[in-house]
Amino acid sequence: MIERAIKGIILKKLADKKIIILLGPRQTGKSTLLQLLQKDFKTPVAWWNGDETDIRTLLENPTSTKLKSLIGKSKTLIIDEAQRIENIGICLKLITDNIRNVKVIATGSSSFDLANNINEPLTGRKWEYYLFPISFEEMASHTSLLEEKRLLSHRLIYGYYPEVITSAGDEQALLKQLSDSYLYKDILTWERIKKPDKLEKLVQALAFQVAQLISYNELAQLCGLNPETVEKYINILEKAFIVYRLPAFSRNLRNELKKSYKIYFYDNGLRNAVINQFNQANLRNDISQLWENWFITERLKFLNNHQKFASRYFWRTLAQQEVDYVEDANGKISAFECKWSVKSKNYISRAFSSAYPNAEANIVSPDNADKFLII
């Protein structure tokens, strides 16, 4: 069993009264993690699954009296796929405010309702954590750093979904199944999107433009949508933990981009499945983009798993001087330039260094990436 870094963090929060909310893509191991932690839960333990129709029906119009009856003598309540339950925020608030001695843990594979509906009613009542596909650091702890560096090209293509990692030889089939069943069916069901073929075209367009500036107007033309709908669909994909955007970093220069975004996928394997490109690293013309997507996503997992907080950006000027990735951690600025080939130019943009002379500058290659991803 691959040990998940977030496990220890959740363990420490089991004793207090706050709700624990665990968000992340489907199939990343949220339910498995909670099953592993079950021996540490106060008993009896009740499990509710938001994917089940009867559970959703029971919780449609929650009251504290009704919830007390449903929970009974349980000391721990697990609500899986809680985002599927209408008014989940109100339900959780009623439990935490009116039912004593019950520890609630809610998981969600999207933040459609879970994140949007609970932020206000659960202010000060929750701990929120994320479980992403397995990280480079977690795999290095499970096998060895040497083994993970040896498998790096393989991970760039197939990614880090748990089942994909543990099913050698079946990676392509599993990723295609995951992309078909999750990317489209779930999202279309939840959001009642009227143009599913357009959404599919948009996801494919984003996959081809990974690690690049995105233009809503350009994407709209490619997909046959209007720019407002493109932005709405990208927001949905972000809430489903399929893609995420990095905003532009701008502090000093007049010619810095200020309102632009670059797009990344939470998992390289899922990205490659969307466009059905599984050819090996030495045969690809997008290896630099894959490397950038891999490192920036692994850095996201690293910060998340160690509860380190930093604002995340890219940097670019109108003259197309750029830095792939920038972090701002309480005023400490760190710049990262991602280079798959160590033979590439190995310096941070002079314009950036001149504008931000106190920034830490890093060139990231396969030789030294572990320095930034493992404590």
Image (cartoon, grey):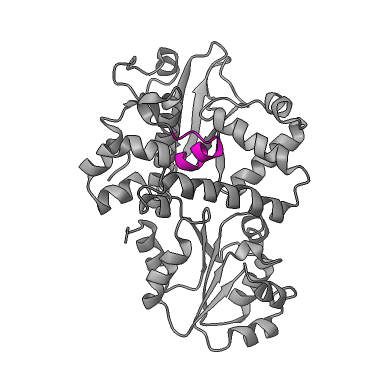
For this view, does 232 lie left or right of residue 151? right
Taking the magenta stretch, the answer to whether it contains residue 274 is yes
Residue located at (42% from left, 31% from top) = 279
Residue 74 locus on image (x, y percent)? 52, 85
Rendered position, 319 above or below 140: above
Q: Is residue 306 visible?
A: no
For this view, does 202 lie left or right of residue 369? right
Residue located at (75% from left, 75% from top) = 61
Taking the magenta stretch, the answer to whether it contains residue 85 is no
Instruction: Kindly indicate the quadrant of the structure image that contains residue 341.
Output: top left
Pick the residue in front: 299 or 182.
Answer: 182
Rendered position, 273 above or below 60: above
Which SS does the magenta portion mostly show? Answer: helix
Residue 310 locus on image (x, y percent)? 45, 41
Residue located at (62% from left, 67% from top) = 51
Residue 148 locus on image (x, y percent)? 27, 42
Q: How many marks?
A: 0
Boundaries of the magenta span: 268-278
Report the quarter where the N terminus lies: bottom left
Rendered position, 257 above or below 136: above
Pick the residue in front: 137 or 358.
Answer: 137
Rendered position, 252 above or below 65: above
For this view, does 299 lie left or right of residue 111? left
Pick the residue in front: 79 or 355.
Answer: 79
Q: Is residue 35 visible?
A: yes
Residue 107 locus on image (x, y percent)? 54, 63
Which residue, as the protein is rendered here, is positioned at the far top? 319
